[in-house]
Image (spheres, rainbow, N blue to C red):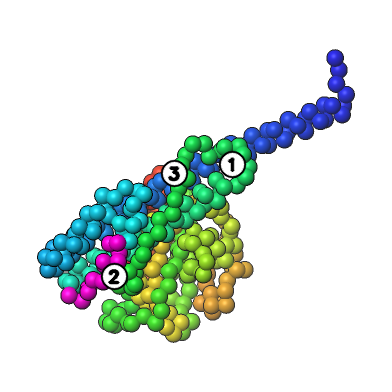
Amino acid sequence: MTFSAVTILILSLVAAVVVAIGVWAYSTANRLDRLHVRSDLSWQALDAALARRAVVVRSIAASIPVPEGRALALLADTAERADRTRREEAENALSAALARLETGRLRPQLVAELADAEARVLIARRFHNDAVRDTLALRRRRPVRWLHLGGTAPLPTYFEIAERAGAVATAPATAPVPADRTTPIPDRARTSARVVLLDEDGRVLLLRGHDPAAPERHFWFTVGGAVEGGEDLATAALREIAEETGLHVDRDHLCGPMWRRVAVFPFNGEVLHSEELFFAVRVPSFEPADDGFTDLERRMRLEHRWFDEEDLQALVRSGSAVYPQDLPELLDEARQIAARRRQPEIRAIH
């Protein structure tokens, strides 16, 4: 039995299509698995942040009059013990009680702890909902549903919780201003996505610029910038990488957020209250481009430079301003997270 050339060609094309579908299905299933793991881990982080808030609330309850304190402690206990299906309702009841709480009568330490706990919940919820959105977007695609690539894993669910007005704005701030100046009152607040961009040798990419309103003030900082309307943190981080370096990074390669930094500082004629969330990503060495710089960034006269650990330590010893301030000590942690040897847990830095 012999086959004609046309038959062989058709069979080859069919085989190629089958192989292509198989490769796509395999890679998509693996990506779905990673997204489900990300959703599970983000829920664990959110659960831990909510539990920490409950601990702080019980401390507050112990410091206020008994009837009100007992009711507040009961709400915290109920929220912490609620199962997943009733957790939102219980946590929102606790949030409503905290919204009515007069923080002016609390000790400053408790106010600061509550602000920090609520800020951690806000970040963890945002991170969790981002993970849920990405997972659902892939799970709901028709080819994925037709081929049952999601398996039997349950669909992750969003977690919506009311946030007390000003919770983040009242969080402790680290101001990168001279020590002899009093901390200024912010003109506006912003959330920023920043990236510790590492190459295969473990070097970190920093930018150097100056304040357009104060050209004598130079400083080094990581890639990143303010989150724009409609963006989540990861989207903003990827956009900033592309704009400030010319490099386009796959979302799956981005690790984090891992650190949180709150700072109040003067810039370009105004005072900013900035909440910064840091990601880590490892990429092959490349020459950064400045084609995507904004007008403001061009007025800052930005320049790029790669730093290894020794160079970074020398830069700090020279007295140059580097943000975040803890970067030399944090560099190894960022490397491990970028190499996915460590699962990031959001923590405060300076």
Q: Nearer the viewer, mark 3 or mark 1?
A: 1
Q: Which residue is mark 1?
A: 145
- Pointer 2 and pointer 3: residues touching (CB < 8 Å)? no
Badge 2 local density, few (<14 within 10 Å), some, or many (20+)? Answer: some
Image quarter of residue 222: bottom left
Say which quadrant the C terminus sits in.
Answer: bottom left
Answer whether residue 132 is visible to the viewer in this image. Answer: yes
Q: Which residue is mark 3?
A: 37
Q: Secondary structure at mark 3?
A: helix
Q: Residue at x 26, y 59 (%)?
A: 53
- Amino acid type of the residue tagged 1 in the rendering: Arg
Residue segment shown in magenta: 93-105
Answer whether residue 317 is visible to the viewer in this image. Answer: no
Say which quadrant the N terminus sits in.
Answer: top right
The answer to which of marks 2 and 3 sits earlier in the sequence is 3
Q: Which residue is mark 2?
A: 99
